[in-house]
Image (cartoon, grey):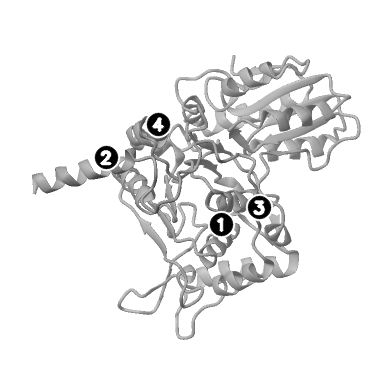
Amino acid sequence: MRAERRAELKTALQKSRAPVPSNGKPAAPVNAWSWDERVPAPPQDMLRSVVRTLTTVPEGFHIHPKLKRIIEEKKAKLEKEGTVDWAFAESLAFGSLILEGVPMRLSGQDSARGTFSQRHLVWWDAESLVPLPYTPLANLKPDQEQFSVYDSPLSEYSVLGFEYGFSLGRPRALVMWEAQFGDFSNGGQVIIDNYVVAAEAKWGTTSGLVLLLPHGFEGQGPEHSSAHLERFLMLCAKDNIQVCNCTTPGQYFHLLRRQMKRSFKKPLVVMTPKSLLRHPRAVTPFADLSRGGFEEILDDPARPAAPQRLLLCSGKIFYDLLAEREKRGDPSTAIVRIEQLYPFPEKKLAGLISSYTSVSDVAWVQEEPRNRGAWLFMKERLERMQHGFRVGYIGREEAASPATGSHARHEREQRQVIDAALAGDRAAVIGK
């Protein structure tokens, strides 16, 4: 057995070093890909067919009353307002990819239902003595690609390692691993460091694995706030991974599709939300899902005519800043979101900043402590752009712990960050 295994490995090694693949076609040039590659949006008819499956209870299936109400509310919101929330957009992304021939696999500690009871990918018959699950996305059409979702053990190292290996063995599939809270990716750090971010540089091994890491400061304490965005940004180099922090369901929808429809594979790290899952403003028009694509930067949706200040941010703090600006009726402040942190969209951001000809002050605003989040990563790159502004920092002071354990202190600090950002401060370190 040992001899046979060694022979297999030797053959694989020789094959990997061969200049021409086994299919006889010349190998593609190493640089035959581009980050700017755009992918088509799915047709609306396809999305509507997925909606029908997601909102239709099979005949004879006894759905739980609470789940029935959730499904009906999503359907009604789509019919009356024409919008979808985060979880609905995610399921539509899954469904559209499956119908386009992409197998899909998701695992995590509460992924079928969703840690925040938002997803409900698997339904259980509420009256059956024998558990009978029904998975809508596995029943889109008879000859569809495989859809699998698993609730995994609390063993991030082993499960993330397995899913990384699965992504190598089945590169056509959308393989996703989700941490129950982003902080729990700590347990899989060895896999992240040795494989996810470095395998292509070390061995030429490419993976399209997606990491979904719930991130956001809502006063839930040190172990339920931070996906350690700063760690992933520190590991970014030589186009090895992608790090995104989306703020709308539509952005997330197009990001997932881009991951599988582009002609190359790179691991994708997504800071997914918690409170935004049900935020009344974090919705996307259904029509936007069948047009456009993922945007690395989002300009101010209500761009002031002649703002004096420009706030740059990423993630859910945008909605806090937006609400406060509206409350104050402030016409002098513009807010721009960086949705993709790496690869850093330098040219697009420089062009957008230069379009704000009346701005005399630029600041980066974040809710994470100063030594965490995206600030240190952004500071170097913003200074390198030489746009004529000295970019200030508005956020919490440096901290050894990711977040405070006191909800009252969290609320006070969050309020101070938002107040400082809209008060016109060039820089403000909260907590000093």
The residue pinned by badge 1 equals 90
Q: Are marks 1 and 4 in contact (CB under 8 Å)?
A: no
Residue at horizontal 69%, vertical 36%?
337
- Front residue (pair 271, 18): 18
Q: Please determine whether, in this image, residue 384 is positioned above or below residue 40.
A: above
N-terminal of the pair, mark 3 or mark 4, is: 4
Mark 2 surroundings: few (<14), some (14-19) or many (≥20) residues within 10 A: few
The residue pinned by badge 4 equals 198
Picture coordinates of residue 48 (x, y %)? 64, 71
The residue pinned by badge 2 equals 13
Residue at horizontal 67%, vertical 17%?
384
Mark 1 surroundings: few (<14), some (14-19) or many (≥20) residues within 10 A: many
N-terminal of the pair, mark 1 or mark 3, is: 1
Tell me how far mark 1 sits from mark 2, CA to CA: 39 Å
N-terminal of the pair, mark 1 or mark 2, is: 2
Mark 3 surroundings: few (<14), some (14-19) or many (≥20) residues within 10 A: many
Residue at horizontal 41%, vertical 75%?
126
